[in-house]
Image: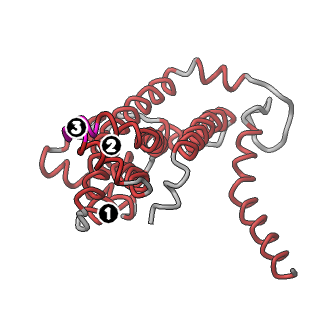
Amino acid sequence: MRRTGWLWVFAALVYAFLYVPLAVVVAFSFNDSRLNAEWVGFTLDWYRTLARDDEMLVAARNSVIIALTAASAATLLGTMAGLAIHRYRMRWMMPVVITPVAMPEILLGVSLLIFFVSVFGPTSLGLTSVIIAHTAFCIGFVAVIVRARLSGMDESVFEAARDLGATPWQTFRLVTLPLILPAVIAGFLMSFTLSIDDFVITFFTAGVGVKTLPLTIYSMIKIAVTPEVNAISALLLAVTLAMIIAASRLAPDALRARS
């Protein structure tokens, strides 16, 4: 019992170390003071300031465009990869798909930067290069989630569809896709979350003049951590948590089956 008690204390300290700073950021986004030294009073002025900040709105628009496009492409390609790995038992394909996920982001960002500059030239860096980089990074997550969903299904369902005369396309459209749809949606939400929050890969592949939320926040905190930074961070945190919760509800076994 004593050992169990110490484990609970240690776990509480670890979670406090992780989440208390996030709670402080959210709380001070409502602080009626430009300085984050002490609490003065409650206000929503910093969120109103964000709504009038053209630079931040452009960065938010770019981040949403990148996240939606990259998540859509990664969902399509990742679903195909997950189906191929499960159906055709392509053991060699799993390491290929998982490598961008397991690889350190700084290494992936540098390698993609070298690829774009070497093949297409320095002027190729922009929104398109960021979308391609984010797609390559997110494909593995979608493939793992879809494969985890397929591994828990009864193969006799697909065999029955084929026995009843369904073509491969009809089997996929009428049987396979409806069954894996929660995993596909979860993969899209997870990809969207990873893309809209990503800084490292975006930093190396964005080029000059491309602004996203993480890059804009980074440029702002070089001067000082103002309540406006806290406000955009709180909104980004809320979007991220909402996407992760939705993905976990749609595919509860996805993260546990990642290995």
Residue identified by numbered label 2: 74
Q: Residue at x 53, y 39 (%)?
A: 217
Of 220 and 71, nearer the camera is: 71
The span picked out in magenta is: 164-172
Determine which quarter of the picture holds residue 86.
bottom left
Q: CA distance from mark 3 to mark 1?
A: 36 Å
Is mark 2 in CB contact (under 8 Å) with mark 3? no
Where is residue 153 shown, x and y percent of the image? 42, 53
Residue identified by numbered label 3: 166
Q: Amino acid at mark 2?
A: Ala
Quarter of the figure with the C terminus: bottom left
Q: Amino acid at mark 1?
A: Thr
Q: Residue at x 27, y 58 (%)?
A: 85
In this view, the residue farthest toward the left is 119
Say how the picture is coloured: secondary structure
Label 2 crowd bin: few (<14), some (14–19), many (20+), radius 10 Å = many
Q: Amino acid at mark 3?
A: Ala
Is mark 3 in CB contact (under 8 Å) with mark 1? no
Q: Can I make out residue 207 in this image?
A: no
Q: Please tell me whether mark 3 or mark 1 is closer to you in this view.
A: 3
Residue identified by numbered label 1: 99
Decide which of tag 2 and tag 3 comes sooner along the chain.
Answer: 2
